[in-house]
């Protein structure tokens, strides 16, 4: 029997343990932090935490990551504190085998709550430390948003602007408040590194921080020099990144298997804010992280981490466009919501058993995306897509669900489809020759009706625009196509969603036709998909 805090391993060798002194690297991080991370959920622990764990084992890093949560404090209370900040990585291979490893790289967990004096004081102590080199983020794209789709600010953002740094609540206000503490302590340099799966993530983070800083300057909450400090990227940098690792929700089957191995209390929990999390994280092994090498206060040897590439901004941009707008995410967003409507739970099972859905997925990537994607050089788009369809997408052991792929799609369709649509408009004058992408957009809107292809209602995945879009579609009745009139126009013409007016690209009417066909009655979605992709041959 071997024990590392809460992990009791009854089969020697089944679970790998840290090869470094966990207590020592955690204590050193508390005394002189180097790396802080905001958003300490699943993808962070297994990917970012896993990179740090590898660097610690290789002697390339000598302290852990300081973990900060700004949204769901149950994650700290239920996952970090009860398990001494240790995590358990479970890598799932396509042949059914798994790799288990305890991660000791998560040094401490802090709740970013301005109303909690002890936690707020600790956060300030961390940010005023001259040793701090970088702050990384996985808070999802909506974590950076200050405005709703109509252009007005969220109420919590208005409150943050009016209340000032000492009462910050939203993630962007909290980060800006901590930057102000660092500014007052000595104007120390720092890199703020978004690792979220969205286009130009560094620019989004910088824009939101600058808005908060400017508004606080206007209100007299911060010194005039603070905005100069934040805006100088030679002092406060906002590197761009591209991140890729499929990380589903924690699996109950894996929890059961771990407990059978002798690892206690592994069952997943759902927090009050609907975070699906467990003491372990299950994910695929392949991973890619391309980072713009812009770190004013230095950085760890990130390039020695598994799957990490350091590059210039243009290379990061091209890598991100390759993955987010062509190769991976558009396939998920085009087929995931449709999979929910068709009654498929697992994404991989759907592609492995439904020939039309596999054809549609391949059309999105191979036929419609690859011809217009620029090559980033460090990664081959063709090889990236080939790996997806050969090894990553078919992996049913990953347990990735279509419902997860439908989370926050309204925030992503513009990036995941818009760039390819714009590329076709630039190349051909319009995008009318596209088929699978408009079919995916129509499928997403059909999914938003909350009724599957058999007439059964289902609960939609979390999405900040869910109520707004459902309200626009509320008069449409599945099985009564005559109830569909002009309800899609406000959505498809909304440039805050797609960054373009879809009707001006030649696709608006095409999507309307597909949508109308999908609501004609039971089985209509399946028939519509077959109509548009079933005849395709070529490499399929």
Image (cartoon, grey):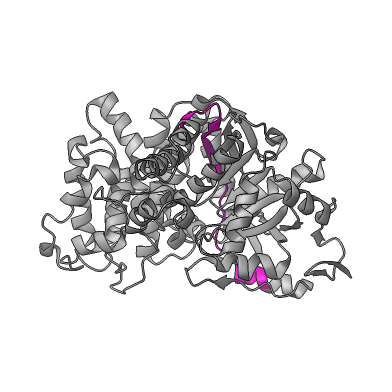
Q: In the image shown, does 127 or 300 lie closer to the viewer?
A: 127
Question: Against 457, is 15 above or below?
Answer: above
Tell me the magenta residue range. 231-255
Question: Against 205, is 234 above or below?
Answer: above
Residue at the spot 35% in from the left edge and 45% down from the top edge: 219
From the top left corner, tell me how far across and down residue 276 is, in percent. Answer: 53, 66
Query: In which quarter of the view is residue 69 placed?
Result: bottom right
The answer to whether residue 395 is left or right of residue 406 is: right
Q: In the image shown, does 532 or 506 lie closer to the viewer?
A: 506
From the top left corner, tell me how far across and down residue 277 is, in percent. Answer: 58, 66
Q: Number of numbered discs present?
A: 0
From the top left corner, tell me how far across and down residue 145 is, in percent. Answer: 38, 49
Residue at the spot 64% in from the left edge and 67% down from the top edge: 79
Residue 118 appears in the rendering: yes
Q: In the image shown, does 80 or 3 lie closer to the viewer?
A: 80
The answer to whether residue 515 is left or right of residue 91 is: left
From the top left corner, tell me how far across and down residue 368 is, in percent. Answer: 36, 36
Residue 284 appears in the rendering: no
* Residue 285 covered by magenta stretch: no
Quadrant where the C terminus sits is top left
The answer to whether residue 39 is left or right of residue 535 is: right
* Residue 251 covered by magenta stretch: yes
Query: In which quarter of the view is residue 396 placed?
Result: bottom right
Residue at the spot 61% in from the left edge and 46% down from the top edge: 127
Q: In the image shown, does 132 or 347 lie closer to the viewer?
A: 132
Quadrant where the N terminus sits is bottom right
């Amino acid at each position: 029997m071997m024990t590392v805090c809460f992990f009791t391993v009854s089969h020697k060798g089944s679970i790998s343990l840290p090869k470094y002194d966990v207590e020592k690297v955690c204590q050193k991080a508390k005394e002189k932090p180097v790396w802080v991370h905001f958003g300490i959920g699943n993808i962070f622990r297994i990917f970012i935490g896993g990179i740090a764990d590898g660097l610690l084992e290789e002697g390339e890093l000598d302290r852990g990551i300081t973990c900060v949560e700004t949204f769901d404090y149950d994650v700290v209370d239920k996952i970090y504190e009860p398990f001494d900040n240790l995590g358990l990585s479970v890598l799932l291979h396509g042949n059914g085998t798994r790799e288990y490893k305890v991660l000791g790289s998560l040094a401490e967990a802090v709740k970013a709550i301005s109303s909690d004096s002890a936690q707020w004081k600790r956060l300030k102590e961390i940010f005023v430390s001259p040793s701090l080199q970088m702050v990384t983020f996985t808070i999802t794209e909506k974590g950076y948003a200050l405005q709703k789709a109509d252009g007005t600010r969220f109420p919590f953002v208005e409150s943050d602007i009016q209340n000032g740094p000492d009462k910050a609540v939203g993630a962007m206000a909290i980060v800006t408040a901590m930057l102000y503490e660092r500014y007052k302590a000595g104007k120390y340099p720092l890199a703020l590194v978004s690792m979220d799966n969205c286009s130009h993530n560094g620019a989004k983070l910088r824009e939101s921080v600058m808005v908060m800083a400017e508004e606080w300057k206007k209100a007299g909450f911060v010194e005039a020099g603070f905005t100069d400090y934040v805006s100088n990227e030679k002092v406060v940098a906002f590197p761009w990144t591209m991140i890729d690792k499929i990380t589903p929700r924690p699996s109950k089957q894996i929890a059961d298997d771990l407990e059978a191995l002798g690892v206690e209390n592994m069952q997943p929990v759902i927090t009050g804010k609907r975070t699906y999390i467990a003491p372990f994280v299950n994910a695929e092994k392949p991973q890619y992280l391309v980072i713009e090498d812009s770190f004013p206060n230095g950085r760890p040897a990130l390039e020695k981490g598994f799957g990490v590439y350091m590059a210039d901004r243009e290379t990061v941009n091209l890598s991100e466009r390759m993955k987010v707008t062509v190769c991976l995410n558009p396939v998920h967003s085009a087929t995931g919501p449709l999979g929910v409507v068709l009654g498929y739970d697992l994404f991989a099972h759907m592609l492995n058993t439904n020939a039309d859905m596999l054809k549609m997925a391949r059309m999105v990537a191979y036929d419609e995306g690859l011809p217009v994607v620029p090559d980033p050089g460090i990664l081959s788009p063709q090889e990236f897509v080939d790996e997806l369809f050969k090894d990553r997408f078919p992996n049913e052991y990953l347990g990735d669900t279509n419902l997860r792929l439908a989370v926050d799609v309204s925030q992503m369709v513009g990036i995941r489809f818009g760039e390819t649509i714009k590329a076709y408009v630039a190349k051909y004058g319009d995008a009318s020759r596209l088929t699978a992408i408009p079919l995916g957009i129509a499928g997403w809107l059909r999914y938003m009706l909350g009724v599957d292809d058999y007439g059964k209602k289902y609960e939609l995945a979390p999405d900040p625009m869910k109520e707004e879009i459902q309200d626009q579609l509320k008069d449409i009745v599945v099985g009564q196509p005559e109830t569909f009139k002009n309800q899609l126009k406000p959505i498809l013409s909304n440039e805050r969603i797609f960054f373009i007016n879809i009707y001006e690209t030649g696709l608006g009417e095409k999507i309307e036709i597909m949508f109308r066909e999908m609501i004609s009655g039971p089985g209509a979605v399946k028939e519509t998909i077959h109509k548009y992709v079933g005849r395709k041959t070529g490499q399929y």
